[in-house]
Amino acid sequence: MVKNQETQDILRQSEEAHRDLEFFIDLLTHDVPSQTMITYSCLEELKSVIDEQDEDSQFFLQTAFQSLLRAQMVLDQVKLLSEVKNLQNGDYTPIDLCGVVNRSITSIIGMFPHEKIKINTSFPKKHCFVQGTTILDNCVINLLQNAVLADKNPIKVVDIIVSDIQESDQWKIDVIDRGEGIPDSKKEKIFKRFFRVRSEKRGSGLGLHIVKTILKKLGGEISVSNRVLDDYTQGTRFEILLPKIEITDFPTSLEA
């Protein structure tokens, strides 16, 4: 009887902790962004009255803008991670991986309007369906974004290959860049929270952790290797594996 009561108390405390966590996440991702927008508006007003020749003032202003944008990025990632954790099987629908890639490419081109980007794609001749949600787009977008940022060449070249693993129940997506690469000693760490390959980078260190979390939730996995076998400086290859599903009918509401 005592043990049953102790178990019930532990379950109750766990449920209360979960509700508290959800409350704090809601507070962080809903109320805080409204305050950052106010701050952003104030900075825009300051920008209009600060002398463009005043280098010190311009430096501090740009630093404030960059800090605010990084804070918003972290908030967006916290919200996304919370959504991923709460995904249930009933939320999943058939998703075509070719559609995921095409939408992601459109997003990346929009994110880097001043960069010259060439993205080569290779798709199977048949549809590549997996069970998931459009949150899967975030995985490919993150990998593409990292590929563009890592590539210091005038034209950023990325290859995306969606392929059928023969005699397997998985689809494979390869995202291959020609960037600075990832040293072998750091490859095992890049999916950990807050890990950055290069300390001078100012990202949150959450992006690849979120990618792995999304894929794991969908029954998939991700790995990293060199584009050129024995030379990490020639770029990086990320390989995503996701379980196949068979679709015989194509309802009009199906995600492209």
Image (spheres, grey):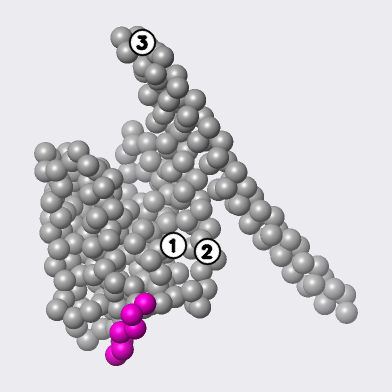
Residue 35 is situated, as x and y percent measured from the top left of the image, at: 56, 36
**Residue 15: in sight, yes or no?**
yes
Closer to the chain start, of discs 3 and 1, is 3
Check disc 1 and give the amino acid type: Thr
Mark 3–mark 2 distance (CA, rounded to whole Å): 47 Å
Residue drawn at 37 percent across, 54 percent down: 208
Which secondary structure lies at badge 3? loop
What residue is shown with label 2?
85
Check disc 2 and give the amino acid type: Lys
Residue 84 is situated, as x and y percent measured from the top left of the image, at: 48, 63
Give the main secondary structure of the magenta stretch.
loop
Eyeballing the image, is 64 above or below 243? above
What residue is shown with label 3?
51
2 or 1: mark nearer the eye: 2
Disc tally is 3
Q: Which numbered marker is on residue 213?
A: 1
Which residue reaches farthest right? 1
Residue drawn at 43 percent across, 49 percent down: 206
Residue 178 is situated, as x and y percent measured from the top left of the image, at: 15, 49
On whether residue 212 falls in the magenta region, the answer is: no
Residue 176 is situated, as x and y percent measured from the top left of the image, at: 18, 57
Report the side of 109 relative to 58 (left or right): left
Residue drawn at 41 percent across, 77 percent down: 93
Check disc 3 and give the amino acid type: Asp
